[in-house]
Amino acid sequence: MKMSTLFTRTDKTAKEYDTINATLLTKAGFVNQLMAGVYTILPLGLRVLRKIEDVIREEMDAIGGQEIKMPALHPSENWKQTGAWDGVDVLFKIKSRTEKDYALGQSEEEVVTPLLKEYVNSYKDMPVAVYQIQNKYRDELRAKSGILRGREFGMKDMYSFHETPEDFLKFYEEVKGAYKKIFERLGLTAKVTEASGGSFSKKISYEFMVLTDAGEDDILYCDKCDFCINQEIAGDLAECKKCGAKLQKAKAAEVGNVFDLAQKYPKDFEFSFTDASGEEKYPFMGCYGIGTTRAMGVIVEKFHDENGIIWPENVAPFQVHLISLGEDEEVKNESESLYKDLMEKGVEVLWDDRDTSAGEKFTDADLIGNPIRLVISKRSLESGGYEVKQRNETESKIMQQQELFDKLIRS
Ligand code: ATP
Ligand code: MG
């Protein structure tokens, strides 16, 4: 993409928010705040979000998840059926001009359970897992953590239904495995954290926590093994339950979680199935969330420096930030043909073809944070090629075209 055609621009003087993610994402032109907790995702931001979503999609499909898209506007009856109409404080409620009540989806058990009831009649129809990637709406009291806590935000939510608790547990473990892969691919280290199972389950749930001071959770973790527990349920626990070492305290952001819902929702919606002996039973259900926009914010919290964002390769908006310097005809022609060649080879390039100063081009490249900066100038051409620098390194290197192609097309 040519930067001269991008309708957004970087704004170094944009307002400073309480959090690094909101400040950097705004200054660099990835998001734009409409009001507290509600953001427009701009072209650069959407490229990142789509990459995050695609990683999640691949891993959900790999364990048999089937993608659907449910509505965000729900009839109040479904929420009354489960007790959540009055029980869930973050639920946005809408009254229509005909005095009918609606809810905006803050989670979708109330839609997915009656939906699957229509299709699952027999034990032969299970296990089944459906997921969606969709915006959620929550009347959060404080929305001060940038895109880590929105009132409208992106989520992947999956729901599974099983004949037996054993079958549920087997799938639960598969999802945990898929989540580990997802966060690794996104460049994040997520700790699998024991947490409360919620109001209707005595069981624990697992939260995937990334250590960051921008997070709103307090966790206790063991640095000798992988044990980790949310302080909410830790009581006065000081030593690791697995290996006895002293637990460390840290702030963390929850990027995902997996939940054992047992038979709560199937019972609420009278969703039963016939087992092999002809008996009517309720399925066992699980739900599995990942905050897609929160993950994007957490990545920025983890990967930045004083000059801007440093995107991990898998989620960067572009692999290459190409800068052409000066008015020289040879530089212009060389840039144009390199831009075309790279795109033909499937390399994603953001070409700063604007008529602005070298200084501004360099600061913008650092702020936006694509992994590789490529400079074409009279000087670089005289030295035989292009000046290549990684966003996370300080030294640049002159590369000839073939060497550059080898590097980019291999990576
Ligand atoms: P939190 O404790 O942070 O409020 P939650 O327990 O309410 O999270 P879930 O309802 O299970 O979270 O939602 C699934 C995922 O959606 C969370 O793990 C988190 O990554 C993300 N998420 C939850 N609330 C928000 C929000 N207000 N803004 C952005 N992402 C969110
Ligand atoms: Mg919440």
Image (cartoon, helix red, strand yellow):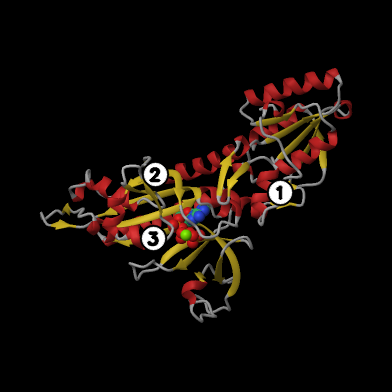
Measure how far apart labels 1 and 3 are at the Cα level. 34 Å
- Amino acid type indicated by mark 3: Val
Image height of 245 relative to 262, above or below: below
> Dot 1 corresponds to which residue?
15
First along the sequence among labels 2 and 3: 2
Residue 411 vertical placement versus 151 (above, below): above
- The x and y percentages for residue 381 are 85, 26
Q: Residue at x 41, y 49 (%)?
A: 157
- Residue to which mark 3 is pinned: 88
- Is any part of residue 198 visible from this angle? yes
> Which mark is on residue 406?
none
> Regarding mark 2 in the picture, which secondary structure is present there?
loop
Instruction: Identify the image quadrant of residue 283.
Output: bottom left
Total marks drawn? 3
Residue 22 point in image, percent of width and height = 64, 50
Mark 1 residue element: loop
Q: Which mark is residue 72?
A: 2
Pointer 1 or 3: first along the chain: 1
Q: Nearer the viewer, residue 239 or 280?
A: 280
Residue furthest to the left in view is 278
Q: Amino acid at mark 2?
A: Ala
In the image, 218 versus 56, the foreground residue is 218
